[in-house]
Image: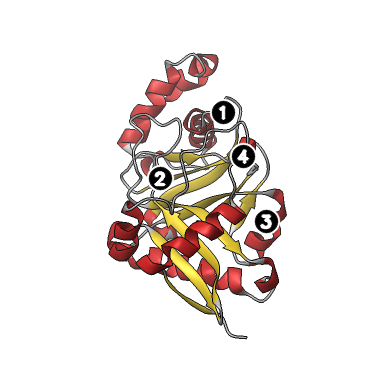
Amino acid sequence: MAVRIRRARAEDVPELLRLEQTHFPVIEGEHHAGFVFRGDETNVLIEAHDSARWFVSVAEGPTGIVGFANAAPFPLPGQPNSRLDPGAMLLTYLAVDPKWRRGGTGKRLLAHIESRARTVKQDIIVAHVPPTSRGFYDSVGWRTYGVRTGYAWQPHLAEIRADKPDPRLGYPHMAVRVLRPERLSFNFSFPLVTGNPWMDAMPVVLNRMINGSLDERAVSPTTHAMMRAFATSEVGRTSRGAFGQRL
């Protein structure tokens, strides 16, 4: 039986809420801000489609919606003046009903989200994923990373960005899809030491500059300023000698 991939419509919201509650239940003892598809503002976002950069794609089977994917801008954790990133998205949901799995539906949903993101010139999509999903993301061309590993990237002429997975919520791995590599000066994974991804990415940038694997001209002025701020922080003082040579 054929499955059609399409953009979500306002009338899909009740079914999307049911799927969200089924596949992404509240985790006892963890903060939960409420389900995405509960609330009047959801209809407005879905109807706005790509203009709001809040993408919901659905897989529709003969009897209704059998899967969905959702991606949206997100504030980067631990970063100074944290705000929604204009060139990056977080894949918050990707789910397919069990009886419709292993037929390519998840892959097609993800491809639909990627296509929409490229249309509005997004640079990168990241996801926080459970161990059981790493193989799937690897198979569709994403890069996945191990536990306690973050990911950082710097768009041209902009400050460095960094993100980390959510192990407490059951998502200890990161998956990354770079959509426009030509828009990034550099990108890399890094070990999470302090738990603050911005802090933990800074020593990697510095070390690459020192060993010559990263051209200083690729590091934006704002990232240089952020590294100076890091150098004076409690964590950065442990690397004062190295920072003093370059900053």
Q: Quadrant of residue 23?
A: bottom right
**Residue under pointer 4:** 27
Sequence-earlier tag: 1 or 4: 4
**Residue under pointer 2:** 74
Tell me the mark number nearer the camera, choosing from 3 and 1: 3
Sequence-earlier tag: 2 or 3: 2
Q: Position of residue 135 (x, y in %)?
A: 70, 59
Q: CA distance from mark 4 to mark 2?
A: 21 Å
Q: Secondary structure at mark 1?
A: loop
Q: CA distance from mark 3 to mark 1?
A: 23 Å
Q: Mark 3 near mark 1, Cβ–Cβ under 8 Å?
A: no
Q: Position of residue 116 (x, y in %)?
A: 39, 67
Sequence-earlier tag: 1 or 2: 2
Sequence-earlier tag: 4 or 2: 4
The residue drawn where x is 36% and y is 42% is: 217
Between 228 and 191, the one nearer to me in the picture:
191
Q: Mark 4 near mark 2, Cβ–Cβ under 8 Å?
A: no
